[in-house]
Image: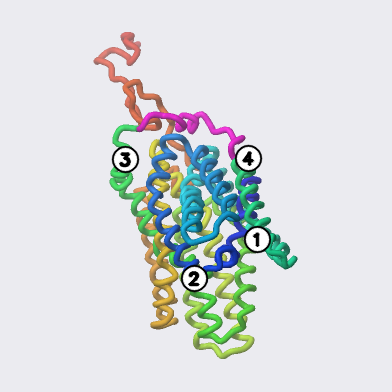
Amino acid sequence: MLGMVVDATGSGMFLPLSLLYFHHVTDLPLTRVGTIMTAAAVLALLSNPAAGVLIDRFGARAVLVGGYLLRAVGFCAYPLVDGGYAMFGVLLLVGLGDVSFPPAVQSFVAEIARGTERDTLLAAQRSLRNAGLGVGGLVASGLLALGSDSAYTVIVLVVSAGYVSAALLIRTIGTGSGAASAAGRPPVPGSGFRTVMRNRPFMGLTALNVPTAFGYMVLSVSLPVYITRELDASHSLVGVLYAVNTVCIALLQIPVTRFLVRYRRTRAVALGAVVFAGSFGGFALLGVLSNGTTLIVGVFVATAAFTAGELMHGATASALVAQAAPEATRGRHMAVYQLSWAVPIALAPAVLTALLTLSPTGMWLLLAAGVTVSAVGMVRLEPRLPAHAVRPDAPAPARTADPAGAPAGSAVPAPTAPPGRSAGGKRRVRV
């Protein structure tokens, strides 16, 4: 958890300033800086399958630590950037570390925690990350308030040091005996990405997450434009709503998740999607309200519903997916699942802006319909998922060693015995 705080605080210091930083140090136009940043992020996204392979081959901890160190090196090189090509190179290096983080951290949590502890640890990770992002943003604001050009350099070097510190902290964490074999184990026969594609229940989880991932993006993409242009509300309201969401996630994610572990994960995730649908319906209704107190109250109520849906869905969905992925190929499974987040995140600015231009109300209703489909699909998919993935308190299947070299964690049938003899070769005596 301390590693997550250090990581998120460093990220929070730089994320709001990334565009301004490279504009400041390179004197390139903002549009060109944005294009270069997008190109590097898209190219880094192509390495997503490689991250899954590395996790399965060397273990999640090694990939997590390696990603931290890649980003630390990249941030150390930021002060040396003096043009577009150098900027693209360091951004690509940092992007590779960014892409490896989600599947690596979820796989690592799956290795060091089981059952309800996994839900709680993932909730803590989300909570502390939101808190760290907020603290980092405040620290960066304080440094920039000094009015010195060196403040930018101080920020990127502090962020680099934060990533090194997080890597050292994660490196000290031991993994359980079941996960220890992941590091340095030989490739499992038949464990390529075709294995993931043949896992239809898991691919169902991945597909059902796509509409919800688009829903998550409205807070940063659609809502600011909708509130200021369509509802003619104050620009300052956008910052207040974002702060309310961030603070609530930081304070409430752990207790909400601890409450939800007594229920099926699939039902909690579906309920979160339904609450998302209600919040989107609420935002759609705001278009018919008059500008005034009623509108402001409605905005806060709809944002509160959105935050409640995020609290119910976020950590529980992560635990459900991590538990549903087979241990021998968890890295590949998590890398594929991560695409259900990465693709909507990349497409959301263009898709949601286009829908907002065509019809603001139609955009909200379409988002509500999408997450409703996800909720219904999750309930229908439940019987096909492993019992220990659906119920946090269900025992995980026992790991068994196969003398013939079967994948770790697979079921090995008991040796059969001829009639009248036990498996150990001794004759059974009837009394």
The mark nearer the N terminus, 4 or 1, is 1
**Residue of label 2:** 218
**Residue of label 3:** 192
* Mark 4 to mark 3 CA distance (whole Å): 31 Å
Taking the spot 28% from the left edge, 44% from the top edge, the residue there is 194
What span is colored magenta in the figure? Answer: 170-187
Q: Disc 1 marks which amino acid?
A: Tyr
Q: Disc 2 marks which amino acid?
A: Val
Residue nearest the viewer, comparing 422 with 403: 403
* Mark 2 to mark 1 CA distance (whole Å): 29 Å
**Residue of label 1:** 152
Taking the spot 62% from the left edge, 73% from the top edge, the residue there is 239
- Residue 306 position, x and y percent, is 54, 69
Q: Disc 4 marks which amino acid?
A: Leu
Callout 1 secondary element: helix
Taking the spot 39% from the left edge, 72% from the top edge, the residue there is 351
**Residue of label 4:** 169
Taking the spot 38% from the left edge, 50% from the top edge, the residue there is 336
- Residue 356 falls left or right of residue 120: left
The mark nearer the N terminus, 4 or 3, is 4
**Magenta: predominant secondary structure element?**
loop
Q: Disc 3 marks which amino acid?
A: Gly
The mark nearer the N terminus, 3 or 1, is 1
* Mark 4 to mark 1 CA distance (whole Å): 26 Å
Label 3 crowd bin: few (<14), some (14–19), many (20+), radius 10 Å: some
